[in-house]
Amino acid sequence: ILIILFFYLATSGYALNVAFQWDKNTDPDIAGYRVFCREKGQTYDYTNPSREGSNTACTIYNLDESKSYYFVSRSFNTNGLESVDSNELFLEA
């Protein structure tokens, strides 16, 4: 049992969670928000958000602490139209 716990603790130390919060979009027909994440040197995959929902806060889980990450958010309305990127945030390794 001690060996299993040791490996679990060793691997869990390399995961990083990042929390975000932003101001609500005041347009009356906003349906929610999407947060996108990319690693340094990559581009955003706008077809695959890291998080989607109606809250103005989120946490991205299990990031590799040895890598650099960049994040943007977009709001979307009830017709499915999406805003442009927010200001880009980054987390350097």
Image (cartoon, rainbow, N blue to C red):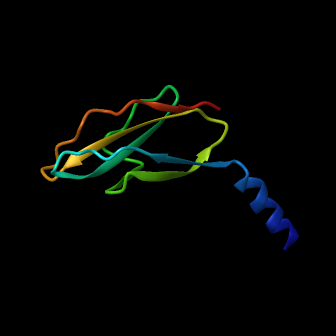
Tell me what residue is drawn at x 31 percent, y 47 percent: 24
Q: Nearer the viewer, residue 89 or 56?
A: 56
Q: Nearer the viewer, residue 27 or 93?
A: 27
Q: Nearer the viewer, residue 3 or 69?
A: 69
The percent coordinates of residue 76 (x first, y second) are 23, 46
Residue closest to the far bottom? 1
The percent coordinates of residue 28 (x first, y second) are 16, 50
In this rendering, the answer to whether 84 lies above or below 75 is above
Tell me what residue is drawn at x 70 percent, y 48 percent: 14
Q: Tell me the quadrant of the picture where the C terminus can be found.
A: top right
Residue 48 shows in the view:
no
Task: Tally the marks.
Answer: 0
Q: Is residue 63 left or right of residue 21?
A: right
Residue closest to the far left? 79
Q: Tell me the quadrant of the picture where the N terminus can be found.
A: bottom right
In this rendering, the answer to whether 34 lies above or below 70 is below
The percent coordinates of residue 78 (x first, y second) are 15, 53
Tell me what residue is drawn at x 85 percent, y 66 percent: 3
Residue closest to the far right? 2
The percent coordinates of residue 65 (x first, y second) are 66, 41
Residue 78 shows in the view:
yes
Q: Quadrant of residue 10?
A: bottom right
Q: Is residue 66 left or right of residue 43?
A: right
Tell me what residue is drawn at x 87 percent, y 70 percent: 2
